[in-house]
């Protein structure tokens, strides 16, 4: 799976310039994949099943995707694109401290279907993409810098926080001790922990 790009492209990297038919096909594939994942394990899903569910042929599928992992990555990128737009319009934009604003948004909204995905096989496939997306935003919020511009120590701390944040969100969505913690209390706890790790007061 391609995990090198955090912000999602408009469509799968394998397809031609997007038009209405391509958009419809990609949407049908993503929808079919999500419906199948609700009913069965990711390891048992086949391309033939997905094509039948999406009402497309196998040749059409391979025009846009190299395999099922490509589909899962496409789903994640679309969700991250939507989440990024929501973050830009977040009501908490009045919060002055960037790190506090990021924590408030992520805790309030979660990561859509990403942090709460119950299928472990799918979660293991998409986690690197989500962690990279989070790490880029943590870097901007904590250090006012792009991820690639951080020094090794900052980079390590940023990824440590991003991975931990995703784990906490998933555990909170499940039946765990974190699930009973209120939004404000959890946001403050996350902020204290992240600020300590990142060595910043932002």
Image (cartoon, rainbow, N blue to C red):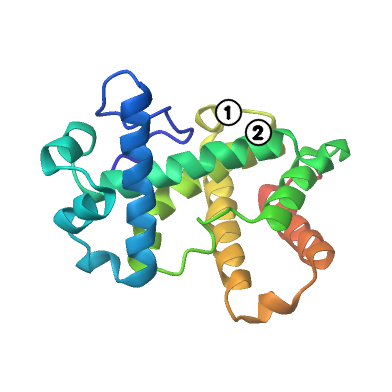
Which quadrant: the N terminus? top left
Query: Where residue 140 is drawn, which disc sits there?
Result: 2
Determine whether label 1 and label 2 are within 8 Å by CB.
Answer: yes
Q: Which residue is mark 1?
A: 146
Choose between 133 and 191: the one closer to the eye.
133
- 16 to 199, vertically: above or below: above
Residue at 81% x, 45% y: name it. Answer: 201
**Front in this rendered view, residue 51 or 74:** 51
Q: Position of residue 139 (x, y in %)?
A: 62, 37
Q: CA distance from mark 1 to mark 2?
A: 6 Å
Tag 2 secondary structure: helix
The mark found on residue 130 in the picture is none
**Residue that appears at 63% across and 34% down:** 85
Residue at far top of view = 17
| Residue 143 x %, y % | 68, 34
Residue placed most toward the observer, 76 or 96: 76
With respect to residue 42, does 8 lie above or below?
Answer: above
């Amino acid at each position: 799976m391609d995990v090198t790009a955090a912000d999602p492209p408009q469509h799968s990297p394998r397809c031609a310039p997007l038009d209405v038919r391509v958009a419809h096909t990609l949407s049908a594939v993503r929808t079919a994949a999500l419906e199948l994942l609700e009913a069965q394990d990711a390891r048992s899903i086949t391309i033939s099943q997905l094509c039948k569910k999406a009402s497309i042929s196998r040749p059409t599928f391979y025009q846009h995707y190299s395999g099922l992992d490509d589909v899962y990555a496409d789903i994640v990128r679309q969700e991250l694109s939507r989440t990024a737009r929501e973050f830009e319009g977040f009501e908490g934009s009045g919060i002055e401290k960037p790190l506090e604003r990021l924590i408030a948004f992520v805790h309030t909204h979660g990561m859509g279907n990403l942090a709460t995905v119950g299928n472990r096989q799918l979660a293991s496939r998409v986690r690197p993409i989500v962690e990279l997306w989070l790490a880029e935003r943590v870097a901007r919020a904590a250090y006012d810098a792009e991820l690639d511009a951080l020094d090794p120590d900052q980079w390590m701390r940023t990824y440590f926080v991003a991975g931990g944040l995703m784990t906490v969100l998933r555990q909170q969505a499940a039946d765990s001790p974190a699930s009973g913690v209120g939004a404000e209390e959890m946001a403050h706890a996350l902020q204290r922990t992240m600020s300590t790790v990142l060595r910043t007061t932002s």
